[in-house]
Image: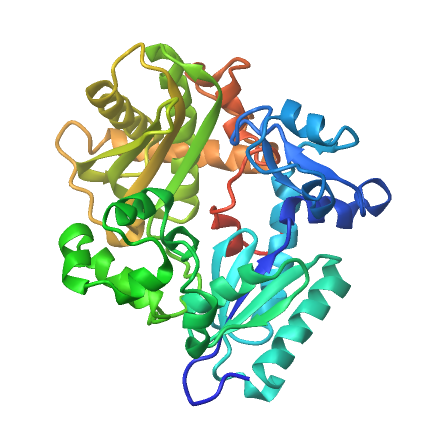
Amino acid sequence: MIAGKGRIILHIDMNAFYCSVHAAEQPELYGGKPTAVAGSVELRKGIVVTSSYEARARGVRTGMTVRQATGACPELILISPDFDLYRKYSRGFMRIAGDFTPLVEAVSIDECFLDVTGSSQFGTAVEIAETIARRVKEELSLPCSIGIAPNKLLAKMASDMRKPNAITILRKRDVPGLLWGKPCQSLYGVGSRTADKLLKLNIRTIGDLAKADEGLLTDRFGVYGSWMKKAANGIDEAPVEPLHEAPKSIGHTTTLPSDLTERDQYRRVLLNLADQTTRRLRHQKMVSSTIQITIRDTDMKTITRSTTLPVPTESASEVYDTACKLMDAHWKVGTPVRLLGVTLQSLAPKEETPLQLDLFTYEEEPKKERLMTAMDALRDKFGESAVLTAGMLGDDPSALIRNKKLRGTSLQKDFLREPSDR
């Protein structure tokens, strides 16, 4: 057990989640077999999104092409993604977690943090973790790993140590012996680019980072440098933050099935992205003041550019026009585009946001709002393709962004704010 009167944090990580969900739904087809989910337009056609542990034992890895994966494992069973199904199971394990504490923070569709400091009525931290793992297995037929620690950072590191079906305790005093010999990139929150920069400072391991001069780190990385030193020493004061009704931003990115080079090609993608993000914005009864686009090229270099609007909006056409202007200003036509994203930021409740309308718009805006409301109602009832603008017609691959069954990302959490019977 974790001694003392400090916090007790759990991190639940669902093992090989997408493949495990399919095995739970159809055990006769997928249970105990080498499987891989691939083929989503969001995750690039022909790329393995995740694989079962049976497939991993045969050399299949996330990011492989389907050809590489089937070469490594000829008996590999390929499965098309079903995000409706993943959301259903995600709600299931989040509900189980919520039975032990109201302090549940959904990190993504397949992982969450729990603060069980005040949950001693359910037993010790280990007993709570064992009960959650057992219920997830019995009620959902899914495996999970759970980390137990005094903070979020170490709980996440602990759940990653042993998979699948494992419960691991990581105390702060264990950090030097268990973590300091590992490379910096294995520290949660430190990416490969940061690790490369640390290497140039002769900081190779988590232990090197823990002992590094804080002034050197802050000079090079700012406040992030100070955070890294604390993290390397097992210090993390971030609270577990339950999912609130009001999101801080609403966005969607899509990795394209083929690289786009022409303006009309990527504008169609931006149109569908603007449509779907503003649909989600209106569903949350919010308006946005800042529009951001994300662009990634074929070398995986990613840039983000944003602009703040004079008047907050919920309109797809305004978001689309703004995204196109940002794209035209910051991307050279002919340069291949691998990924595009639109994110709505600076959100505020619509009913609390005064909209300053001029003489020419005050009569038109109520008409536009009634039209958007009617279109949203039709699409809620009959599906996303029930009402489309002319620019969204056709079988362009970006139209799959509207397909909620096929599209999705592990980080999208809107569905957790919706009633479970939706």
The percent coordinates of residue 261 (x first, y second) are 36, 12
Q: Residue at x 80, y 47 (%)?
A: 32
- Tell which of 32 and 58 is nearer to you: 58
Q: Is residue 182 above or below residue 99?
A: above
The percent coordinates of residue 253 (x first, y second) are 42, 34
Q: Residue furthest front?
A: 202
Q: Residue at x 76, y 50 (%)?
A: 24
The percent coordinates of residue 412 (x first, y second) are 47, 46
Q: Quadrant of the N terminus?
A: bottom right
Q: Is residue 231 above or below residue 36?
A: below
Q: Is residue 265 above or below residue 253?
A: above
The percent coordinates of residue 326 (x first, y second) are 23, 25
The image quadrant that residue 273 belongs to is top left
Q: Decide if residue 376 is in sight here.
A: yes
Is residue 98 shown left or right of residue 328? right
Q: Decide if residue 104 is in sight here.
A: no
Q: Residue at x 41, y 57 (%)?
A: 188
Is residue 155 shown left or right of residue 349? right
The image quadrant that residue 361 belongs to is top left
Is residue 393 shown left or right of residue 230? right
Q: Residue at x 36, y 52 (%)?
A: 190
